[in-house]
Image (cartoon, rainbow, N blue to C red):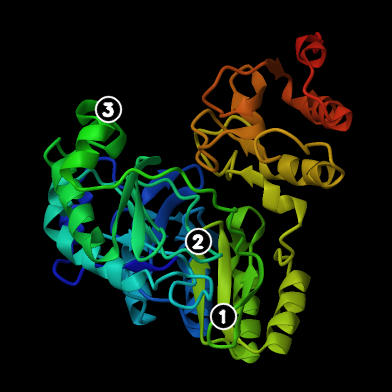
Amino acid sequence: MSVAPARAMEMSAETTAMRRGACPSLPEPMPTGDGLLARLQPAVPLTSDQLAGLARLARECGNGIVEVTARGKLQLRGLTAESAARLPAGVDALGIVPVGGFPVETGALAGLDPAEAFDPRPLAQAISEGAARLVPRLAPKVSVVVDGGGTLHPGALKADIALTAGGSGRVLVRLAGLTAGEVALERAAEVTVGLLARLAGHGATARMDRMVRQEGMACLRAEFGLDAVPEPHRAPAEPVGLHALNDGSFACGIAPPFGQATAGALERLADAVRKAGARHVEPAAGRALLAVGLARAAAELLAREAAALGFIVDPSDPLRRVAACPGAPACASARIETRALATALAPLLAAGGMGGGVGGELHVSGCAKGCAHPAPAALTIVGLDAGAGIVVEGTPREAPARIVPVARLGAELRELLARDVMEDEFLKKDPA
C-alpha cells in the first residue's frame, strides 16, 4: 500500500505515544498474547534486501512472524520490551523510513496501473502536506484514501475521506463510505484538507461518520462545492496474481496465508524476488506483497517459486475468501484457535458451499472485536466464553444465531456448508 507522507511535519515518538487510540507503531508497540506487536508503514517501497532484513529482525527481536495487514502495513510479532526498544534502530539501519506526518493511502500500483484515470500520488502528497498541521487535533485513526481509478484500487479500505477518479477530470468524494459528490481534480486537495479541518473542529476523537450525522451531508455538499452524482459500481480489487503495468513490465502479487509468514519463508521469498529482478516490493491492501517491475516469464517463475514456499499466488485460492485473526494463544482476547480451523474449512468454499451471501466469505474471529474483517461476511465464526458462535451474513459483534461447543464446530460447519443454504431449521437444531 503506497502512502504519501507529509514533508511539512514529522511527528515525534513522544507525540505519537501520547495519543490515545493510536495504532501500534515502532516506537509504541501493542501488547498481545504472544508479546508486543509493532506495526510499520514504509514511506517508499522496499527492496528485496530490505524485505529480507525485516525477516531477520523478526527472528532476532520477535518470534519470527511477519504479517501484512488488510491495509498493506507490516507487523512484527512476539517482541519483548527490550527487543522492541532495539527495533527502530534495526529498521533505520536497513534504510527503511516509516511514514510520518499525515499519511494518505493510495493503491499499491499507484502510477503504474494502466487503468488509472490519473496518478493519485501527487494529489495524495498535496493532501498529506496540507493536513500535516492538523495531525495533533485529529483522531489517530482518521484516514484518507486516494484512488486514481486503477484495477488494483484501494476502494475496499474504510476511510473517513475517500477520493476516487470520476469522469472527465473529476474526483468522487466519499465521507465515511457515503457518496458526497464530485469535485474538479484541481480542487480535490483543497476540499479534502478543508473537510479534515472541519473534522478537527469536532474534537480529537471525532470521526467523519459522526460529523456527517451532526452537520448533514447536504450541508457539507453545498458548503464544499460538491456536485451530487449517482453511486458508481467498482469491481473488487485482488492483489494476488500477475498484473500488467503501464511500462510494459509486470507485478507479481503474492499473499502469505492469512497475511502471516515466518521469517524463514519471507527470507527465501526475498531471495527469489531478488533473483527474478524485481525493482521493489510493495506491501498491498488485502494482505499481499507485490514484486514490481518483472518480465512476464520472470513473474511466472517467481509465482511458482512462491507457491512452493507456501505463499498464495492464485487469486482463486479459497484461502483468499477466508479471513482469520491470529486467534488463541497469540491474542489474549481470543477465545478460540482460528487459523487451523479456517484452513480446514477453506476447501469447502472451493466446493461451492458458500456460493451465496455477502461475497461468499468466511470469517473466523477469536473474539467479538473482529479485527481481521470488520465488514459482514457470509458466515462468521466467533470465539465466545460459551463456545463458538455462528453468525450468518453479519459480523462478530452481532448476536450469533447459534453457539456450539468448539470441539464440534468443524462437523457443524461442514453440515452447514455442504447444504449450501443457511436454513433456519439448521440454525435452530439442538447442538447437543
Q: Percent position (x, y) of residue 327?
A: 59, 40
In the rendered structure, are the residues bearing label 3 and label 1 in contact, judged by CB atoms less than 8 Å apart?
no
Mark 3 neighbour density, 10 Å: few (under 14) some (14–19) many (20 or more):
few
Q: Relative to residue 125, is residue 342 drawn left or right?
A: right
Q: Relative to residue 323, is residue 113 drawn left or right?
A: left
**How far apart are the alpha carbons under marks 3 and 1?**
41 Å
Mark 1 lies on residue: 245
In the rendered structure, are the residues bearing label 3 and label 2 in contact, judged by CB atoms less than 8 Å apart?
no
Q: Percent position (x, y) of residue 179?
A: 38, 42
Residue in view at x 53 percent, y 59 percent:
67
For the C terminus, the quadrant is top right
The dot on residue 213 is 3
**Image height of 154 relative to 48, above or below:** above
Residue in view at x 52 percent, y 87 percent:
279
The dot on residue 267 is none
Residue type at numbered disc 1? Leu
Residue in view at x 35 percent, y 81 percent:
93
Residue 182 or 257: which is nearer the viewer?
182
Q: Percent position (x, y) of residue 147?
A: 42, 61
Q: Percent position (x, y) of residue 174?
A: 36, 46
**Image height of 89 relative to 30, above or below:** below
Residue type at numbered disc 2? His
